Amino acid sequence: MRPGVWRPPVEPSTAEQTVIRLVRRAKLFVFLRRYRHELFDEAFQTELAEVYRDSAKGQPPVPPAQLALALILQAYTGVSDDEVIEATVMDRRWQLVLDCLDTDRPPFSKGTLVGFRTRMIAAGWDRRLIERTIEIATVSGGFGPRALRAALDSSPLWGAGRVEDTPNMMGHALRKALGVIAVQQGWGLAEGTTVLAGRVGAPILTGSSLKAALDADWDDPDQRDHALAMVLAALDAVETFVTAQQDVLPAAEAAVAVARQVRDQDVETTPAGVARLRHGVARNRRISVEDPDMAHGRKSRSTLIDGYKRHVVTDLDTGLVPAVGLTPANVPEATVTDTIIDDLAAGNLTLAELHIDRAYLSSTLVRDRDEHLEIFCKAWRVRNTTGRYDKTAFTLDFDHGQLTCPAGTVMAFTPGRTVRFPAQVCTSCPLHDRCTTSSRGRSVSIHPDEALLAELRKRQATPTGRARLRERTKVEHTLAHVGHWQGRRARYHGQRKNLFDLRRTAVVHNLHVIARHRNDQQAA
């Protein structure tokens, strides 16, 4: 059954006015109370109701607008699902927004909240919430429709899953499989896991740490290989046990599959048939049992990440966030722009300027850009360690595809290829010693987007151009705000759930921007 339209009072009651006066900080509660009817008007509530199946059976669902407000407040305050339910009864600020002032019973259950969040993720309505804040900002005045001057940047988000080494990760997955079956058979989780581990012949799985149970010197190659053989034997034993079960739950099979995945990525067999830990790191290596999407990565040479990178687009003129993205930490930043493009297109937004760092230069957003999109970025430095002519001493004619050397020799070029000047020309050139030491002649590599790089170098050589580059710092401030609300560590397991969390955090940021703008209008 689809829910009806939620119609809470527009004007605050006397009791609500008292609460509003007492709120000194956390002003978003007051803003949402005053403008919730605008954010969730009848048309938008009808859209939200589409996440429910239309059926004559069942009880009327809790209004989606009320649940969506609760999810926004959850991102704002950083509380858990259980704490959301508690706040609806114990915190009058929450009650003020959700129209349940002084209630002694929560307006919805934890299961209802989690179910609505799952429906929103499946339907992509977290993106729609961002679009809705942009719509509200547009009608507020000062945020009129136009091509955006935007900046894109990223920051690290550590994953919520526990990162373990190979033996402990396999042990974790195998204990999880036995625990699922133990609960299915009516045992307590801890007791049943211990009993089943002994029954299948894998007593090393009874403890919380498999490496502690093995008690091996992992610096000794022979002991390490012997301990690994015991872990692999436990995997075979548990896999055989799970396969033999009737009506086994998918969660048990999935846990065994994780253990096999860790074995396949981290273990190799020598020609003599001895299993050993693989040297190096496998591509797209799984690092957590609970979160399959987390990855090892770097934000910089000094900043290591076990988790994700969050990407935020900021409108430089208004401070609003029209699009966000989330990628595993081991994925290049440039890969996120497909998601960014989709988000902008869904909101009917276009870009006039894009301010980025060099990590995004190879993205489709830059390579396949519209001719009217202007890119602002610090160009890659042209290195010159020999003191001879570098690439900037050569003249590039992009209209005719010609490269002219300092001595005037002209060669045709193709972006993405290397131009090689004839050896006989270079040998007889009076500028030879200042250009190259190669007996085969000078070569110049042309970047696939060399025209853009030349434009960027020309721009950053002027004070005005360098000032434009500094505008990108605004997105760094936005990332700091988003990081404050979302936190340093992810709330959920899985990339899609954490993208939902990032999007609703962007909603919180946008609502703050709108609230500040309206306050400025009222003060004027």
Image (cartoon, rainbow, N blue to C red):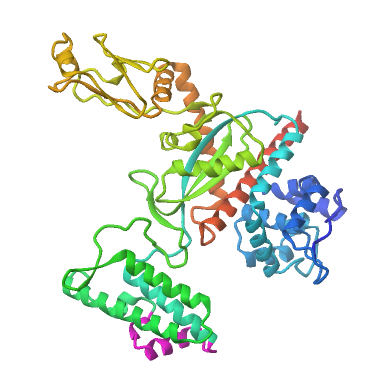
Image quadrant containing the C terminus: top right
Q: Quadrant of residue 162?
A: bottom left
Q: Main secondary structure of the magenta part?
A: helix
Residue 38 spot, x, y in % from top left: 79, 44
Q: Is residue 190 magenta?
A: yes
Camera sees residue 173: yes
- Kindly identify the residue that appears in the image at 19 percent across and 17 percent down: 435
Looking at the rendering, the stretch of residues picked out in magenta corresponds to: 185-207
- Kindly identify the residue that appears in the image at 44 percent across and 37 percent down: 360
- Kindly identify the residue that appears in the image at 48 percent across and 50 percent down: 327
Residue 458 spot, x, y in % from top left: 41, 18
Q: Quadrant of residue 103?
A: bottom right
- Kindly identify the residue that appears in the image at 37 percent across and 71 percent down: 260
Camera sees residue 480: no
Residue 290 spot, x, y in % from top left: 47, 67
Frontmost residue, 219 versus 102: 219
Image quadrant containing the N terminus: bottom right
Q: Quadrant of residue 359?
A: top left
Residue 240 spot, x, y in % from top left: 39, 83
Frontmost residue, 272 versus 220: 272
Q: Is residue 110 magenta?
A: no
